[in-house]
Image (spheres, rainbow, N blue to C red):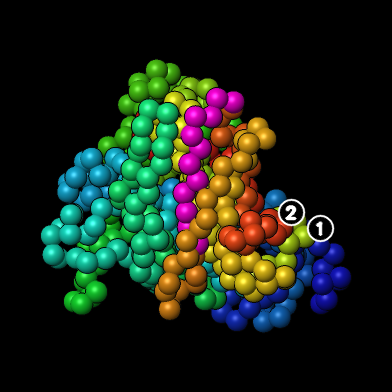
Amino acid sequence: MSEQEVNCKGETYTVQAGYTLNQIAQKYRVTLEELLAVNPQIENPNLIFVGQIICIPSVAVVPKKNIILMTYTEYLASISQFIARTVEGLVLVQELENGKAVVTFFGARLPAPQELKGDAFDSYLGEINIADERYFANLEIVIEEFSYFIQSGTITIEKPILVGTIVIPDNPFAVFKSKIAIKLYNQVERVMSDSLLVGRVIKDELKHSCEGISYVIQPEDTLYQIAQKLNISVEMLLTANPQLEDPSQLYIGQPLCIPEGVVPLSKWAVVLAPPAGRELSSLAGGVALLDKLEENNYAATFVVTGVPAPEELETAEFNDYLAVVEIAGEEYTSILKKTTSSNQEPTWAGVVVISNNQSVEPQNSRLNVFPVNKITKSRGDVILSGTADRQKIIRNL
């Protein structure tokens, strides 16, 4: 049956080798019954063939780029409560066609491995587990430290920014059921530690719409304790979280919606994607994390992956990438630094400092990445872009 004969009002999917109808339903976050309802041509759900065109219901959620906020584990807290509460772990999950995916890890404020466990480990490792099949990436330091001036003096961030990318081949199991972790690693003995930071790509996180701020459940959190910290009732939390079937059954890493206006927003995560009409590899994407440092001062950390070298773009006059945060007509910029790994997708990263901004908060800002010529200062067209109000996250209440 041709694509036209399917008469599909949603997207279509061409069956790949190794896939079952149930796995396709999982991939697009619909039930098997919903999938069969829009595919009346399928008489036996156990009999589908490679190349067959399947209609995907229009209600299906088909995410292309999603940010997963990681949470610290009891293992990391047992080493250092301070590090556990200050470290950041973000993962950008990009789902491509035919079951492939790109997972980019971003860790900030992690100390040198020796500061955690002496000489037992010498590096960090990112891991994603999809249906008990595990994929790994070495996390490399992109920025070791940076200093910047603000009205009250100079602030130096000494902890490194680590990034790593995993390209996942065709896997018949949905990425949204995967488990993500950052661990310590000994490259000589090939030994891993327990997980320091963990996350899960889950259906609730991708489908539930939150009008406020998305908070990630931490070890020992209860709904009552969270409500007390926020000075609101448990009922208010339940109203904002209709996906909670049993309020007593929370798990570490679970997303929770905090009603808008309850807490001041001090952290944002933004997906960076190619603008409409910009033809790039399907791997192209990025994430930006905005942190409030003190009154009117912010830092925006960019991580970009899957883009070509600036010299390979249309005019060949560029030699770098420039991160730009636009707030109320003002621009704040920083050149992005490239990783030098032979076995991973190249990654660019950098920090934009937004200092003494009296106008508006960054949730109204636009974040762009441009190819740039450092000598002539000329810019090309925007290669990746995002808006700070698309994703709002906090971890510590």
- Percent x, y for residue 354? 51, 37
Q: Circle 2: is it few (<14), some (14-19), or many (20+) Cα within 10 Å?
A: few
Query: Is residue 115 shown left or right of residue 305?
Result: left
Quadrant where the C terminus is found in the figure: top left
Residue 305 visible to the viewer: yes
Three-letter code, disc 2: Ser
Asked if the residue at tag 2 contacts the one at tag 1, i.e. Cβ–Cβ closer than 8 Å, the answer is: yes
Q: Secondary structure at mark 1?
A: loop
Q: Secondary structure at mark 2?
A: loop
- Percent x, y for residue 52? 72, 77
Three-letter code, disc 1: Lys
Query: Is residue 228 shown left or right of residue 174?
Result: left
Reply yes or no: does residue 356 show up in magenta: yes
- Percent x, y for residue 351? 46, 49
Toward the front, the furthest residue is 375
Q: Which residue is painted at 43% across and 18% down in the image?
A: 232
- Percent x, y for residue 374? 58, 60
State which region is magenta.
Answer: 348-359
Q: Is residue 121 above or below residue 73?
A: below
Q: Nearer the viewer, residue 89 or 33?
A: 89
Residue on which disc 2 sits = 58
Quadrant where the N terminus is found in the figure: bottom right
Q: Which mark is residue 9?
A: 1
Q: Is residue 391 above or below residue 41?
A: above
Q: Which residue is painted at 46% across and 32% down in the image?
A: 297
Q: Which residue is painted at 59% across and 47% down in the image?
A: 324
Q: Nearer the viewer, residue 47 or 271?
A: 271
Q: Quadrant of residue 122?
A: bottom left
Distance from Cα at disc 1 to Cα at disc 2: 7 Å
